[in-house]
Amino acid sequence: MPLEFLFAHRHLTPRDAAFTLNVRVIVPGASPLTTTSSVGWKPAEGTADRTLMLAALGVVYGDIGTSPLYTIRQSLLAFGETSEAAIFGVLSLIFWSLVLVVTVKYVVFIMRADNRGEGGLLALTALVLRTTSRDRKRYLWIMGAGLVGAALFYGDGVITPAISVLSAVEGLKVATPLFEPYVIPISLVLLFVLFLVQRRGTAAVGGLFGPVMLVWFAVLALLGIWGIAQQPRILLALNPVYSIEVLAAAPGRGFIMLGAVFLAVTGTETLYADMGHFGRRALRRAWLALVFPALVLNYFGQGAVLLGNPAALENPFYKLSPEWGLYPLVVLASIATIIASQAVISGAFSITRQAIQLGYLPRLEVRHTSETEIGQVYVPPINWGLLVAVVILVLMFQTSDNLGAAYGIAVSGMMAITSVLAFLYMRSRGWSRALAVPLFGFFALVDLTFLSANLLKIAEGGWFPIVVAALVFALMGTWWRGRRLLAEQRARDAMPLELFVGSLNPERPVRVPGTAIFMTRDLTQVPVALLHALKHYKALHERVVMMQVETEDVPHVPAERRLEIKEVGKGFYTMLVRYGFMDEPNVMRALAQCRVQHFRINLMETSFFIGREKLRPRPRRTAVFRWRDRLFIFLTNLALDATEFFRIPSNRVVELGGQVEI
């Protein structure tokens, strides 16, 4: 049995002690069997796990790790009292939310739904879309749910930096009221610097993120232990009966309070989205061994402080600290919130890159900021758009308390969509209905309960992330629909490639030396650019290649599947270049692999022909959908030039085109 081993891609450098190994077992007469596994960099597997766990602390757990800054305060303010029953009930709700939502749902079950090692809502959507055909309504419903979830992620990405940085800087007011007028300016400066340094990437400072967050979680745990030591009976709140009692005693206020309790689990989606970078094992061990215990200890420590002094509700997190440690804690909290914000911003860049590759957004400038980590990218339009939105949020809401009222809707909506898609995926994987329905039905019930509670915040500011998500969804839906209609229009007007080649004769048109590569979206049709070139030049190159760049619904395409070359006849060839939605398209690098298939291309004798179409709206009887036409044309003009996006040398490119009505 011949074996073929291929190092497909690395998520971290060898120094970071992890890479991914694809093993293809090829048996004559059978289809190849491919398996993917994470392999530790020797000398010690334990060292690799610890390295990955430390890195995960800085990238994955920053958002949920800074929730103690505001969750207890927001929950008790929403409930309207600081009685012992209220404190015990809130702590019990927070604890069991962490257990059921994060530990059971995500760590145990959702992380099983991976797209060849990669996680996240778009990766999960791509998995579920494979279970149905494109011409069924179910396909559109699944894709629509995935796009709504992705749009909600941007709504979360706007609020997280604002509420995290504000809540940290507000600790200065606890030290002295003199700092109160400077909270907003200091927060804006920190946020501006945060977004300004995004273009440099996180590679330079990424090594600091893990150790800083390790210190942060250690401090959370120590402060919590100190508080619990003052009031040990606070540990009774581990009993779920207290959560039931507080909700039963005041159902109306308790339901409102659930929207604030949900703040304890915000950031959980990052756990799933970054699974491909660190692997299940490292993420699970980091959560169970450090993050979860540290969070629980700190929450219960804050509850203990409130039992002894209800007036500490002014800021129970900072009231845990002794006076001499207050300023260092503010500094540490500010750094931790910046790291948490960095993780969300990086997530927005990554999901934008995936959406571009999958055809849900126009081609935008995507800069890779690390030579070793493919996931580190910078998207300038998204960066500055987020900065503008975050600044508007801070100036509008002024305090973390006000922002807390706007936080949670986007995240709870994402979680509900994830539960539905995960159910569909698990059913396609052979899970019985008797197991899948009650399990994911319970998860969906919890998600919908939190979502319903958060929907009560719409009038208080929850409308903001909904507006952001609606705008992003409109952009994604318009772009996808517009590209589909444009492709259908091209297909109606196009000439089949085989018919065109068959109609050629040896004398006409004239064949000139060299190779012409025509970029196309369909290898079965003649590109419009070729027809324009033939019309103007009255000649064809000796060798004509139709190249289609295709993005598959898998994270990475291995090198041996990158190129597929077929000869059509009379000097015509088709070339299919495949990429995964996490790969970086690079046509020149792909052409370098042609030698493997004995198809040699001399780039000095090669020209690339790219069609450029100018769109204009077609006159309609009704103006109901005219705004979508104009939006699609705007997005088309905004899209990055194909030459730059596919890394094609500009001095080898010829652009030809015309006008198209849509």
Image (tube, rainbow, N blue to C red):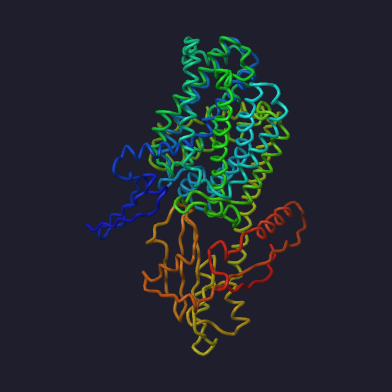
Task: List x then y, in percent, for residue 487.
Answer: 59, 62
- Asked if residue 449 shows in the view, the reply is no
Quarter of the C terminus within the rendering? bottom right
Depth check: 386 or 93 in front? 386
Residue at 46 percent of width and 69 percent of height: 575
Depth check: 141 or 552 in front? 552
Residue at 26 percent of width and 60 percent of height: 29
Furthest-front residue in this view: 324
When the figure is inspected, residue 191 is found, relative to residue 534, above or below; the finding is above
Furthest-bottom residue in this view: 507
Depth check: 367 or 444 in front? 367
Residue at 66 percent of width and 56 percent of height: 635
When the figure is inspected, residue 258 is found, relative to residue 543, above or below; the finding is above
Task: List x then y, in percent, for residue 228.
Answer: 48, 14
When the figure is inspected, residue 551 is found, relative to residue 603, above or below; the finding is above
Task: List x then y, in percent, for residue 185.
Answer: 70, 34
- Asked if residue 111 shows in the view, the reply is yes
Q: Is residue 399 left or right of residue 370?
A: right
Count the marks.
0
Q: Is residue 45 left or right of residue 163?
A: left
Depth check: 438 or 596 in front? 596
Task: List x then y, in percent, for residue 555.
Answer: 45, 51
Quarter of the N terminus within the rendering? bottom left
